[in-house]
Amino acid sequence: MSTPLRVALVGIPNCGKTALFNRLTGSRAKVANYAGVTVEKRSGLLTTPAGPVAELLDLPGTYSLHVTSYDERVTRELLLGHQRGEAPPVAVLAVVDACNLRLGLRLVLELKALGRPLLVALNQIDLARQRGLQLDRAALEAALGLPVVETIAIRPDGAESLKVALGELLQHAPPAEVGPPLMLPPPAEVETRYHEVEALLAAAVRRPATLPAWQDRLDSLVLHPWAGPLLLLAVLFLMFQAVYAWSAPLMDGIDAGIAWLGAGIEGLLPDGPLKSLLVDGVIAGAGSVLVFLPQILILFAFILAFEDSGYLPRAAMLLDRPMRRFGLSGRAFIPLLSSFACAIPGILATRTIQNPRERLLTILLAPLMTCSARLPVYALLIGAFIPERSIGGVFNLQGLTLFALYLAGIGSSAVVAAIVQRSQRQRHDWPLLLELPGWRLPNPRQLLQGLIERARLFLARVGGVILAMMVLLWGLSSFPGPPPGATEAPIYYSVAGLLGRGLEWIFAPVGFNWQICIALVPGLAAREVAVGALGTVYALSGQDSEAALASVIAATWSLPTALALLAWYVYAPMCLPTLAVARRETNSWRWPLIMAGYLFGLAWIAAFVTYRVALWATT
Amino acid sequence: MAAAVTLDQLPKHQRARITGLLPSADFGNLDALVTVRLKELGFLPGAELTVVGFGLFGGDPVAVRIGTTKFALRLAEARKVAVIALAEAA
């Protein structure tokens, strides 16, 4: 096999580069319907029918090579060969959305001026034809002086001719040149470029595509002065209700399965460390996290459907004005919404924010958005302490509590942002200029694929880091054994017990007992571990190990303690991977340390106030 | 009917033709960059656009359609776009 030849995939944002990349390389990178899904370069191998092997680079979308945000800069630097340690591509595959020819072809002309071998893929050609486009491919090819291939990235065979054309291009491309980096040609007058684009369109397009009328009508509703905001609120509320209301039967099923498994093993094995490890460590620990899979999948089903529909950028537009008051803009909305799934992709997504100060602020606020790893913690405590009651016949009290916790995170981020904003003088505004992509029905196959991927990741976490922490915790909680004449459960005298009792002096004022303190420590690796850790700690504390964790804590904790722990988790920087990614993205230790510091402080204060108020209210 | 105004003054559903891009103090030293980006996105003299909608409660920002592409702009950005309103509504 020859060394793979680097080919860069370049196009305007949201033209389908990643879908095409997945099709060509068999990868499963994330695709969605908004600009800026891909913020990092990503590569995959592809063997062309003619022989040459290509290393395809999927790059963040960019409208132009001249005016750039952080993610667009990645693309430009790599294309020009300015990135140190990165070989420049030998050829460029330009992706043009056939529904949006003007913007795409303008970028193609900029790319052509670079002088690298160039191949043009006309993507979504089926949709464009459906919308009335009549285009003469051969004429476009002749007018451009570049090979042009029609592709349908979402169809399994939609990119076969592209592989053939790419193979041909690479056979004639000069071997990987390691010459000096290219210089960006001086920007041609934008008007001149567009005149060239008009000439291309005149030569090749007999009838342009038009946007279906229902798209405008839908926008009229979604961006309606009153209906628009109400719809946004309803959609978000429905999402949180669904997470609670729809998941219950599935969770009960999984719970029953785990209890059955535990009882089975308990009956099979003789008493001893192995049985304790399996029943108290693995099943009580990892099992109590596994229960939350349905809730996490329902949350992701909503997020994926929004992403695919085109609604997100509209929501970002609606929220631009309120967010400006806090030194943010609509551009921060998508990173913050992604943080509800997990702060890590959320922080990565801040690369699409042009204003560096706004980007930094968004990174600092991302952990305040309730990530899906917090869901197990919330769900456990709500399930154990908040009665299942319907309010006004429509709302479920548990669902409302969950919604309130999410709102607490959002509200606090607004307060933090407002404080940061006051301490800084905003010099000039950065433009918003947000593209609103065409509406589309979420693709069920893609949605299902996304959900399977999420389920796989979650199970890998349960089987990997969570299981490992559980086994470790079990070890620390079981040894050394209790001294003779011990009055407490054995775990009280173990290493973990010592640690928990040591931490108790920090957390006693907020109502946490030593069992909770133990669970907080492994929870640093991943938040949901705390739930598993409580499972193990209580299983080893001699509590009835057959009983589900929820009923154990319901019987042993006071309501103020449970509420304080909920308040703690709204803020607590209990996730080392998030701090690590914040370090990488801000390129300093300063910001992750500030982040950890302010979140820890807020968490303690919130837990303290909650505990004291609840104590006062319940006595 | 063909009064020269800027994009931020147009009502919903209004069609208009762009006549030019104006400098603005709102963006300080970024102004030239904002002008270039607007042009790159297709806000060029001669292009036709339609106002699609507005932000919360009918305020900032404004959404417009140029050809088959839609963009959201803040009113500050829209003030840079000089237009003449076209007679018939889309």
Image (cartoon, rainbow, N blue to C red):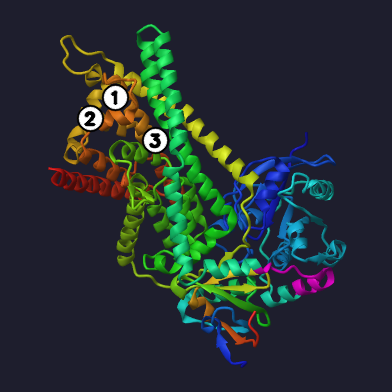
Question: Callout 3 environment at 10 Å: few (<14), some (14 to 19), or many (20+)?
Answer: many
Provide the residue designation for mark 3. A528
Camera-side mark, 2 or 1 = 2
Q: Is residue A433 above or below residue A453?
A: below
Point out the stretch of residues depicted in magenta: A196-213
Provide the residue designation for mark 1. A538
Question: The residue tagged with tag 3: helix, strand or loop?
Answer: loop
What's the amino acid at mark 1? Tyr
What's the amino acid at mark 2? Thr
Provide the residue designation for mark 2. A556
What's the amino acid at mark 3? Glu
Numbered label tally: 3
Camera-side mark, 2 or 3 = 2
Q: Position of residue A82 (x, y in %)?
A: 62, 54
Q: In this view, does A528 lie above or below A584?
A: above
Cβ–Cβ under 8 Å for marks 2 and 1: yes
Q: How far apart are marks 3 and 1 (CA)?
A: 16 Å
Q: Is residue A398 left or right of residue A215?
A: left
Q: In this view, does B1 lie to the left or right of A301?
A: right
Q: In which quarter of the image is residue A191?
A: bottom right
Cβ–Cβ under 8 Å for marks 2 and 3: no
